Amino acid sequence: MSFFSEALWVLLLGSLLGLELIGKVPPTLHTPLMSGANAISGITMLAALTLIIKSGDNVPLLIIGSISLGFALFNVIGGFLVTDRMLAMFSRKKTRK
């Protein structure tokens, strides 16, 4: 079995496992789960930046690093927006005088 086919199997099985696990999470836990995913996306951003820096003249690595950095950045920003909205739901509302 080649490296590409093994990597494809890992991606397929990881995707199916992730779909199964996320599908069983109750709706009240989705927002805290997304807040926790910000840390994982932060690590992905660091790995993508390292890949971009170390790519040198290798254009495919530069493209892969840029795409992964974009997706991780999108996930971090979305996670912060959702977390901010969740925290706003629990804050006290200002009363009118």
Image (cartoon, rainbow, N blue to C red):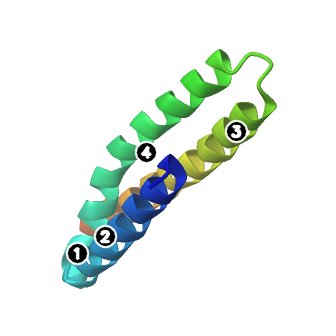
As measured in the structure, the alpha-carbon distance from the residue carrying label 3 to the one carrying label 2 is 24 Å
What's the residue type where badge 1 is placed? Answer: Leu
Instruction: Quadrant for the N terminus, please.
Output: bottom left
As measured in the structure, the alpha-carbon distance from the residue carrying label 2 to the one carrying label 4 is 15 Å
As measured in the structure, the alpha-carbon distance from the residue carrying label 1 to the one carrying label 4 is 18 Å
- Return the residue found at the far front: 1
Q: Nearer the viewer, residue 82 or 72?
A: 72
36 lies left or right of 52: left
Name the residue that disc number 3 marks.
Answer: 66
**Where does the image place residue 40, in percent across and percent down from the top left?**
35, 44
**Where does the image place residue 12, in percent across and percent down from the top left?**
42, 69
- Residue 72 vertical placement versus 1 (above, below): above
What's the residue type where badge 4 is placed? Answer: Ser
Indicate the secondary structure of the residue bearing disc 3.
helix
Q: Quadrant of residue 39?
A: top left
Marks 1 and 2 in Cβ contact (< 8 Å): yes
Indicate the secondary structure of the residue bearing disc 2.
helix
Indicate the secondary structure of the residue bearing disc 4.
helix
